[in-house]
Image (tube, grey):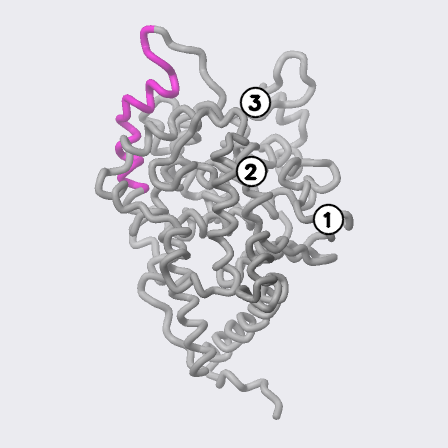
């Protein structure tokens, strides 16, 4: 993939590739309707989706929001005192494996990789990264009768996750899971069903790794999972598509695979934004308005074919299953990143209607959302530069000129 980044302090996505000029003034990017369009799919699909998903992770995960709160506190302290506070022990745990197969950070990245592969299509990725379409089709025999192209399948998905570029850095947890689920006799399908549901839920707990590993142990012996995937053994219903399985098993697997105490204390990032220090954040304070619009859209039944999903902890599973096209489109429309920096221009999230009304009434910010984003970016750059200088043993104002 091309170079890309997401900044947790600002919510800004950076994609080092050109976007279509027609996107410059659009309030809603057509990307979310058709991420694989020939006009942009090859160059920016996975990168834009992957980095935007980090923004959605923050909104859906109380754990990630707590880390952002801590970094926000360090940032504000620096602006007030000029001193760099040490990283918290909780932040250090984020990158520490502690003798486990992978760290929390690796699970976060694999979670994003899972959905960027699903959205781009593993067949497209294989075509771009690994082997020719002809060799791929001949080797794995994935062509559907009547089609000349190999089809999206569990085999193609696993091949990308196990052998695609950067898989050791971005897909280690999923590769581990495939091996762990071998005992079920259907490692691929079980891993694909369980991973997004369990990971989404685990990151609403205080200890995502503990929750994740415990849930996987339960999944190995889950009769509910077996019945959901294969149907009643007496009838052996026809295998459903992966999207149908996610919809069918969402509400059934969470209470079976996550212990009851964890379920009772699940917390979203939105919860923390509304009640914690981030409610004063110049950008993230807008998130509750964005999410409420998304929630209203969902309640009005605008998600055709959503399968009657309901999430026991946050009203809807849209953030947990963003690979479902209706959910992806809604998230991209109502909860986009505040700013996306492409190589040729920057796209800004349109001002929320409620915010505009508050501004006209003199009760909102006197600066627009785009102005606040740019200002915060500048300040965060100064903070990051000060951290680098301190690591080198230099004062924070080393490069200042009087």
Measuring 49% from the left and 21% from the top, which residue is drawn there? 241
Q: 213 or 60: which is nearer to us?
A: 60
Residue 193: x and y, percent? 41, 29
Residue annotated with mark 1: 23
**In this rendering, is residue 238 above or below 303?**
above
Q: 226 or 184: which is nearer to us?
A: 226
Q: Crowdedness of circle 3 by 10 Å Cα count: few (<14), some, many (20+)?
A: few
Specify start and end residues of the magenta stretch as a single range.
212-234
In the image, farthest residue toward the front: 361
Residue annotated with mark 3: 140
Measuring 51% from the left and 65% from the top, which residue is drawn there? 282
Measuring 57% from the left and 66% from the top, which residue is drawn there? 362
* Magenta stretch holds residue 201: no
Question: Which callout, 2 or 1, points at the residue further toward the start of the chain?
Answer: 1
In the image, farthest residue toward the right: 21
Residue 178: x and y, percent? 40, 33
* Magenta stretch holds residue 217: yes
Is label 2 in contact with label 1 (beta carbons under 8 Å)?
no
Is label 3 in contact with label 2 (beta carbons under 8 Å)?
no
Q: Mark 1 or 3, which is nearer the eye?
A: 1
Measuring 39% from the left and 32% from the top, which residue is drawn there? 310
Residue 165: x and y, percent? 57, 44
């Amino acid at each position: 993939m091309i170079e890309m980044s997401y900044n947790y302090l600002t919510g800004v996505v950076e994609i080092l590739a050109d976007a279509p000029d027609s996107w410059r003034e659009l309030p809603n990017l057509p990307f979310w309707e058709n991420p694989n369009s020939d006009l942009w799919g090859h160059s920016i699909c996975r990168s834009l989706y992957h980095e935007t998903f980090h923004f959605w992770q923050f909104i859906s995960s109380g754990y990630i929001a707590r880390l952002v709160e801590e970094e926000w506190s360090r940032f504000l302290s620096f602006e007030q005192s000029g001193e760099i506070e040490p990283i918290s022990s909780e932040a250090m745990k984020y990158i520490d494996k502690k003798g486990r197969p992978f760290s929390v950070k690796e699970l976060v990245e694999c979670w994003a990789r899972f959905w960027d592969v699903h959205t781009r299509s593993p067949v497209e990725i294989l075509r771009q990264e690994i082997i020719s379409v002809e060799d791929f089709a001949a080797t794995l025999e994935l062509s559907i009768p009547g089609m000349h192209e190999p089809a999206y399948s569990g085999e193609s998905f696993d091949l990308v996750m196990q052998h695609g570029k950067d898989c050791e850095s971005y897909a280690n947890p999923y590769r581990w899971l495939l091996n762990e689920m071998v005992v079920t006799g259907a490692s691929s399908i079980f891993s694909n069903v369980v991973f997004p549901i369990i990971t989404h839920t685990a990151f609403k707990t205080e200890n995502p790794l503990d929750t994740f590993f415990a849930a996987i142990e339960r999944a190995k012996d889950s009769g509910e999972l077996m019945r959901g995937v294969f149907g009643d053994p007496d009838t052996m219903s026809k295998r459903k598509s992966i999207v149908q399985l996610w919809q069918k098993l969402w509400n059934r697997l969470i209470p079976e695979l996550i212990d009851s105490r964890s379920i009772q204390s699940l917390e979203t990032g939105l919860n923390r934004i509304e009640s914690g220090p981030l409610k004063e954040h110049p950008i993230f304070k807008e998130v509750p308005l964005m999410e409420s619009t998304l929630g209203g859209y969902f309640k009005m039944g605008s998600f055709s074919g959503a399968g009657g999903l309901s999430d026991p902890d946050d009203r809807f599973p849209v953030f947990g299953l963003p690979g479902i096209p209706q959910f992806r489109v809604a998230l991209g429309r109502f909860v986009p990143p505040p700013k996306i920096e492409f190589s040729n221009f920057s796209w800004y999230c349109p001002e929320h209607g409620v915010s505009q009304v508050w501004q006209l009434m003199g009760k909102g910010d006197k600066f627009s959302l785009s102005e606040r984003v740019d200002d915060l970016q500048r300040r965060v750059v100064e903070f990051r530069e000060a951290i680098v200088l301190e690591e080198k043993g230099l004062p924070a104002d080393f490069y200042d000129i009087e």
